[in-house]
Image: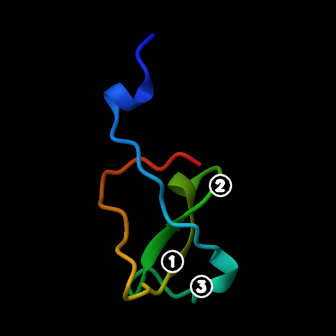
Amino acid sequence: MVPLNKIFDIQYGHSLELNKLEECNPSEGIAFVSRKSGENGIAAYVKQIPEIQPAPAGELPVL
């Protein structure tokens, strides 16, 4: 069996909590991906925190 780190570049994400972020509509914010069935895991759209870079498009979050 091949270890996952030989196939994927594994990185820790941010430890942000939705209840501590400012929600907004999709045209103003970025997707907050969470453990949620449906809607591709998007729990809400939130305003970006200037000092935190969002994950790049195409990255696979594993929760």
Q: In x, y percent, where is residue 20? A: 65, 84
Where residue 41 appears, as percent x and y from the top left, is 56, 56
Location of mark 1 (residue): 45
Residue displayed at 31% across by 51% down: 58
Tag 2: Cα neighbours inside 10 Å, few (<14), some, or many (≥20)?
A: few
Q: Taking 39 as reference, is 5 above or below it?
A: above
According to the picture, the residue beneath numbered tag 3 turns out to be 21
Choose between 56 and 27: the one closer to the eye.
56
Q: Are the residues at dot 1 and dot 2 in contact (C-beta closer than 8 Å)? A: no
Asked whether the residues under the numbered discs 3 and 1 touch, taking CB atoms below 8 Å apart as contact, a structural biologist would say no
**SS at mark 1 in the image:** strand
Displayed quadrant of residue 34: bottom right
Q: Residue 50 placed where, x, y %?
A: 37, 88
Image position, residue 29 (x, y; %):
42, 83
Pointer 3 local density, CA inside 10 Å: few below 14, some 14–19, many at least 20: some
Q: Look at label 2 and name its amino acid.
A: Lys
User: Label 1 crowding class (10 Å Cα cut-off): few <14, some 14-19, many 20+?
Assistant: many
Residue in the picture at 40% in, 15% down: 2
* Residue at image point 57% right, 86% down: 23
Disc with the residue nearer the chain's start (1 vs 2): 2
Closest to the camera, between mark 2 and mark 3, is 3
Q: CA distance from mark 3 to mark 1?
A: 10 Å
Q: Is residue 25 above or below residue 6?
A: below
The amino acid on which the numbered mark 1 sits, given as a three-letter code, is Tyr
Give the mark toward the camera: 3 or 1. Answer: 3
**Is the N terminus in the top left, top right, bottom left or bottom right quadrant?**
top left
Amino acid marked by disc 3: Leu
Residue 9 vertical position relative to residue 1 in the rendered view, above or below: below
Could you give the CA–CA distance between mark 2 and mark 3, rounded to whole angstroms? 17 Å
| Picture layout, residue 31 above or below residue 25 | above
Q: Quadrant of residue 44?
A: bottom right
Q: Which residue is mark 2?
A: 36
